[in-house]
Image: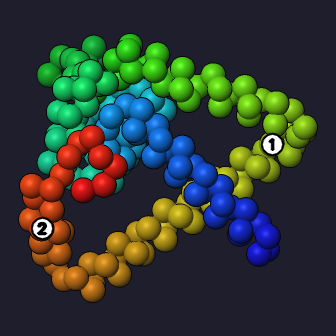
Amino acid sequence: MWELANEVRASQRATDEVDEIGARFFGINRTDAKCVDILDQHGSLSAGDLARESRLTTGAITAVIDRLERAGIARRVADPSDRRRVLVELTEKARAEIEELMGAPMRESAERFLERYSDEQLRLIIDFTRLSREVQQQHADWLRQKLAERDGPDSQTRGRRRLKGHYSPRTSAP
């Protein structure tokens, strides 16, 4: 169990490193990069859906979308099934850069690596990965609750005020 836990933790750090470098390639911060990844995975989403997936407030997601639009990475488009609704989608330029930097190289490495597993083993890996994600999401919810208990009800507002003026969309952290 410890060996598995250590490998999972090391894998998470390696993923974190790739995410950090990927954000730097795009010239955006980590939060914006996370939203780009969500859009890449899910396609067009409403701002509300993107906020829910990223666990950001609707106000924060508006700022993210504005920054991504200014960077030429995402755009707002009318929903083809309901012209009153607006969706957010990646630009073709962003999709091409994602494919060049993350798609083909990662896919080729993964295909060579995964060829050694049977379909049954791959289903087990998928199940393990899904359960690991659920455990992490539950733990994040628990940590958020503990943080709110520790810092009090207005802690998020205080934190934003403290960081105001120190944020740069070209850095990974405020």
Please give left or right for residue 50 compared with residue 98 in the image. left
| The N terminus: image quadrant | bottom right
Q: Secondary structure at mark 1?
A: helix
Whole-angstrom CA distance, mark 1 to mark 2, is 46 Å
Q: Residues within 10 Å of mark 2 (few under 14, many from 20)?
A: few
Q: Secondary structure at mark 2?
A: helix
Q: Tell me: residue 138, above or below residue 35.
A: below
Note whether residue 133 is visible: yes
Which quadrant of the structure image shows residue 71? top left
What is the number of the mark on residue 162? 2
Q: Closer to us: mark 1 or mark 2? A: 2
Residue at 48% from the left image edge and 32% from the top image edge: 41
Q: Could you tell me residue 57's position as x and y percent?
A: 21, 53
Tell me the kind of residue under disc 1.
Answer: Leu
Q: Tell me: residue 93, above or below residue 153.
A: above
Residue matched to label 1 = 122
Q: Could you tell me residue 87's position as x and y percent?
A: 26, 26
